[in-house]
Image: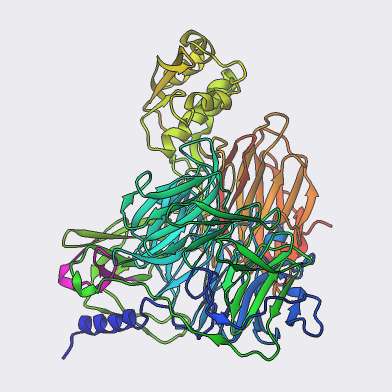
Amino acid sequence: MMTRIQRCCLLFVLTMLCVPSSAIAGEFDWTYWRGPQMNGHSPLTNLPEKWNPKGGDDSNLVWAREDLGTRSTPVVMDGLLYALVRHDAGTKQDGEKLVCVDAATGETRWEQLFPVYLSDVPAERVGWSSVAADPESGNVFALGVCGLFRCMDAQTGEIKWEHSLHEEYGLLSTYGGRTNFPIVHENNVIISAIVIGWGKMAKPAHRFLAFDKRNGQPVWFTGTRLFPHDTTYSAPVFASFNGQAAMVFASGDGGVHAFQPRTGKSLWKYNVSGRGINLTPLVVGDRVYCGHSEENIDSTQMGALFCLDGTLEGDITGRSEVWRQKELFVGRSTPLMIDGKLYAIDDRAKLHVLNPENGEELSLTRLGSVQRSSPLYADGKIYTITENGVWYTLQPNDAGGVDTLHKMRIRGSSNASIIAADGRLYVPMGNALYCVAFKDAEPQGEPVSFEIAETPVDADTVPAQVQLVPVEALLSPGKQQPFQVRLYNAAGQYLRLAEPDEVNISIDGPGEIRVIPGEIEMKPVDGNAKTIIYANAVYTIPGDHASQSAVNVTAKVQDVEGHARIRVMPPLDWTFDFDDGQIPVTWIGARYRHVPLDFDFWSQLNESDPQAASLYIFLQSGFVNFAQQESTFDDSTPQQGWTSLLQYLALDEDKPKTIEEAQAKLGGSLQALTDANFLASADWSTWERTVGDQTVTEPRLKVTRGDRKIDGNGVMCKIRTIPKGARSQGWIGPPDLSNYTIQADVYGFHRDNTLPDIGLIGQRYAITILGAHQKLQIRTWTPQLRMAVEEDLAWDPHTWYTLKLQTSVEDGKAVLRGKAWKRSEDEPADWQVVAEDDPGQHHGSPGLFGSAKVSEIFYDNLTVKANTTADEATSETSVKN
């Protein structure tokens, strides 16, 4: 008879083996944006070379939907087409939605709204990502522009599970709107974004998060180099190198990377661009083809198309290039490989045909002026369309070029890519979606399957990686969190669940964890039936735990470790005064962008020596964010530390060039900080650099941190020393909270005749004091103020105010009430600004908003409290007319 752990292992192994490393799809489905082979090829034949978007006899236009204009490349599965589009443009319901239509007729089957909240994305850029369809589960996966990630039943649109990725993990939703594409591998669905999270992930990076596609549990969470330059939309593709499964993608850090899709382990990285890369790689055998339109890191030349050897490992920069053709601006449209030739359309809509072995150009054809979408190869033809709507049907010729079979102009712009499925072409434009095929045509062609060729797992059964699942958890006191301890070999192939007697598991933080035999019976919630969870370990946090806490979990099997993290969040009410000199580690997107300060100390400095006060903020941000006891400032590195310091202090226009000049400008302020024991020392020296044929000596400053601590009047300061983080949001609680009031004391500087914007977030809405406009505003979507309400507010700089936002759900609508007043005065009885959103957002994490681009922001005495009956009564009677 099997033991419980043996049953657990057997069931889990059967589950893991139920989906092979190949796509299980209909014969001619298009379930991922680059197609069934992830290379832009379709096996379909009998496709038209000509069509007319105006319709009519012999137009080959099957159907058209002007209401489905999109920049999202559609996908097709089991006769249904899925695309993300804008919803009710220009109305109070403006947002995003996933639409499912009958692929043959264009008739809508279902729609699922994706609300846009707490995002800077412009309205015209919603519907950026592409859906991933999964034939094995019968589900589709979609990421909205604001980070709402959902698993839905492909037939009905029913939401199976969802995650608000910015509230839960720190996804960055920016003005550019660039949104990544999900991809399914076996039991994982993988998504990525620039993430500014919590704890060790508080600093920004392009990070990938794999969820169990069956239940939404996070499986692995890892990223590329810290401090990426851009958000990007390069979609991953799967490949195999040296018999090892790989997920290949380009990153916001300017590199191309390969990760193991089951574990997230990095296989190799190749750094090439000074900015983020948007192009999706093309993998053919062991070769990886990719490109970018930015400055190369090893020269001042812009743009490149390159070929890499994917069989190498580690940092392959400088040693993996098969070839690189600089000044080819192939940064958006993914190339095609056809009959041993590489077809690449650059950003200026010029089609280059190259020898893939050496990068030699064979031909060049000008198609237009701007290219964004990627070409399709099907039925021996290349289908492509330029950004301004010039359609081409091209055919490769024996001379190494292409022949134009058809060219026409389509009204609208093209950002999404043409696809082929079930005998039809689908053409997404910004103002319409078209279906093109011969009349009554049946699908023709030879079906293909996509397989990842791996070395059999039996070749290596030695555990080399330990995976703790879930890798991230959010827990309230009195609850339990089961964990599975999964073992993988060096190639990232699943081996088995760990046995209880071989697991050494521990935690760093409150609560307790224990190894269990393999089953745990979870307590019923809200009257639901008890649930049996198969696990190796279970973590428990006592019911009386009263503070937000971080817990790090470590599982060790033999000499191999796996890690997971837990955030413990007690129920409301919460109070934070920062007097202990700490910003809660559990807050998403708060640390790194904010630092604790001693407000009394800063005030004293600001009265006697304002430069010393500014220097205190600047140095404190470096000490705290990088856990440094020493900081050195010179211009010997690309970071230009000395220049950055002078710019912050507004000393860069008359930049000191010698130690004597530097000491004259900074010596007194440094001495004030040393006398107060904030600095232990401030030492000057010089360094030399060569300019032309001359050697120039420049000053260097080294400061050492003193013993001074924050004593009694701590505040949280949003700093302006982070160039790409001065305007940001942060979240301080679970995303399922509702009907609460968030309040904080806020203080803004006045620099260059400009005040910052300071705000609080509640239930996915923000109340903001707009410094430049002298307004108090409630909103949810910054560029599209579809439900925003604002009132005048005379806001004085260098003055503490109290800001308050009450969120509630009333009669099925979200109701938001806010006020702001000088802290030294009594709270006004009336709400100053009231907004309604029907139906609106009925839950969401409390949080912070601030724009410190011009000056710092201080927060103090932050509280989040559940609304009471008295609050509701006050809400009804105390609304400003």
- Place of residue 596 in the rendered image (x, y in percent of width and height, measured from the top left): 48, 38
Q: Quadrant of residue 431?
A: bottom right
- Place of residue 660 in the rendered image (x, y in percent of width and height, measured from the top left): 48, 8
Queried whether the magenta region covers residue 504, the answer comes back as: yes
Name the colour scheme.
Answer: rainbow
Q: Is residue 488 left or right of residue 585?
A: left
Is residue 840 something one can see in this rendering? no
- Place of residue 78 in the rendered image (x, y in percent of width and height, measured from the top left): 55, 86
Which quadrant is home to the N terminus? bottom left
Q: Farthest residue in the right direction?
A: 881
Q: Count the marks.
A: 0
In the rendered image of this protein, does residue 406 appear above or below residue 698? below
- Residue lying at 60% horizontally and 77% vertically, measured from the top left: 420
Q: Farthest residue in the front direction?
A: 399
Which quadrant is home to the C terminus? bottom right
Q: Is residue 263 left or right of residue 376?
A: left
Q: Is residue 852 left or right of residue 505?
A: right
- Residue lying at 46% horizontally and 21% vertically, measured from the top left: 673
Q: Is residue 60 left or right of residue 183?
A: right
Range covered by the magenta-colored residues:
482-505
State the residue in front, 861 or 517: 517
Q: Quadrant of residue 497?
A: bottom left
Queried whether the magenta region covers residue 495, the answer comes back as: yes
In the rendered image of this protein, does residue 21 appear above or below residue 827? below
In the rendered image of this protein, does residue 159 appear above or below residue 513? below
State the residue in front, 83 or 790: 83
- Residue lying at 74% horizontally and 58% vertically, measured from the top left: 784
State the residue in front, 438 or 695: 438
- Place of residue 514 in the rendered image (x, y in percent of width and height, measured from the top left): 24, 68
Is residue 459 something one can see in this rendering? yes
State the residue in front, 586 or 654: 654
